[in-house]
Amino acid sequence: MAEIVSPRSLRPVPDELGLYFRAGYNDHRDLAAAIAAGKRKFLGIVFEAHRVERHRELIDSAEKAKLECILDPCTQPAATPGGHSSSLANLAWGSDKPHRRNDFQGQALKEKANQIASFAIEHGFSQVMAPTHYLSRGSDPWHQIDIEATQRLRHALAVAQRRDIGIIYPLTMSYAVLRHEDERLQLLEGLDGLPINSLWVRIDPFGSDSTGTAVRNFVEASSDFHRVGVPVIGDQIGGLVGLSLLATSAVGGLSHGVTLKERFDAANWKRAKSGKGFMPSHRVYFPLLDLYFDVGRSRRIFDGSDRLKGHFGCSDPSCCPRGVIDMLENPGNHFLTQRMRQIDGLASIPESLRARQFLEQFMRPTADAVVRFASSRSLNEDEKLRMERHRKRLDLLRIALEDLIGSMAPRTISVQPVARTIRENRLSR
């Protein structure tokens, strides 16, 4: 008698891992060029409200490409002595001095929510960040104000018949709060009932150069974030640290700048400004090392060693057709291409295997490459010391991840964000 084999149910194809870019002052050129060239392996772009006119053309390009166009109303820096600026003060919801809590209460809050909603509609944004604030402790009084502000913003969009505009809840907390469960849970109270599409988590300080201990603390805390029931995005987190959070499903996506803003540190927000600020230039990304060098130093390193140029110069014709020349002359484009490729590579690995394969395919090759790079005689003493510190940090990160991955089951995983086309299609049904 023939054996009857029951059909095996197949897992659905997973949504792509989320990648969003924060448009810095001059990033519109590289991001617009990437979109025009069909390099669209990312879900959206975050635009700061006071730079909307400067980034007008990029907003239009992103809209045509059906990428999420996300408005950041910049209420977090606007409420701090170092983050507040004249350009933020000139926004409709701005103030000539840093915001205080009474600026977000009663009628004043209603007006600000209406102003932010109107601005998002007028400038064609598909999502808007709720007007939240930096939270330094579990009992921070801004917390309840931020929850009400989110509800007010949703109401303002509904009244304007723009329920299609999604709301992101930006949760920015100190690292000390992240480490303490009771305080962390206080800041998550009330979020699970909010009308939000995703939760963007930003930790002060945390990012691309964080230690293995800090990464472990984030991953272990992430199960609390997952309970909110929406995709969790690691904001201003890049490099192998960000990729490790994706690999362990602590987050469903990452957001950062173009070669910049891969680490968040609110130190400058907390102290009054002194002197004029400056716009940092793009750095050159060395993906095999998970490091950046400025353009001048990168050129000197390559000029001093054909071996380093051959091993670490970009040889991908779809990224840098002229090799090292394009890597140095167009560092923004090089970075965007390489980061999209890294995220795409992680997404191609089944979720159940992703964490362990991340160690083999990302962590170990990077550590080996750092050792090879550091052995070059063309590096000066400062560069050799930097490579030694970097190697030690990578070793400790790898050890922490190996131990963490071995003790992860059972665990929760972040909901993955969906592309704008899918989100809007669901709304139209």
Image (cartoon, rainbow, N blue to C red):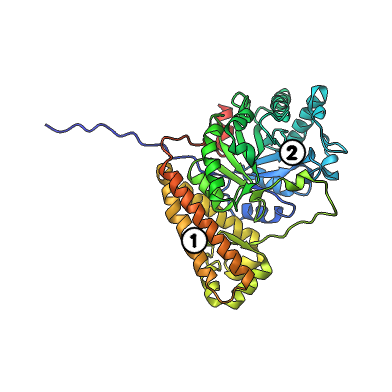
Residue type marked 1: Ala
Q: Quadrant of the C terminus?
A: top right
Q: Which residue is mark 2?
A: 76
Q: Which mark is residue 79?
A: none
From the viewer's perspective, tell me whether residue 90 is left or right of residue 327: right
Are discs 1 and 2 less than 8 Å apart at CB?
Answer: no
Gap between marks 1 and 2, in whole Å? Answer: 37 Å
Residue type marked 2: Gln
**Picture quadrant where residue 253 is located:** top right
Judged from the image, the secondary structure of the residue bearing numbered disc 1 is helix
Q: Which residue is mark 1?
A: 367
| Residue appearing at x 51%, y 36% in the figure | 414
Q: Position of residue 93 (x, y in %)?
A: 82, 34
Q: Is residue 101 above or below residue 406?
A: above
Farthest-out residue, right: 96
From the viewer's perspective, tell me whether residue 384 is left or right of residue 95: left
Judged from the image, the secondary structure of the residue bearing numbered disc 2 is helix
Residue 200 visible (yes or no): no
Could you tell which of marks 1 and 2 lies nearer the N-terminus? 2
| Residue appearing at x 41%, y 35% in the figure | 410
**Picture quadrant where residue 194 is located:** top right
In the foreground, 371 or 258: 371
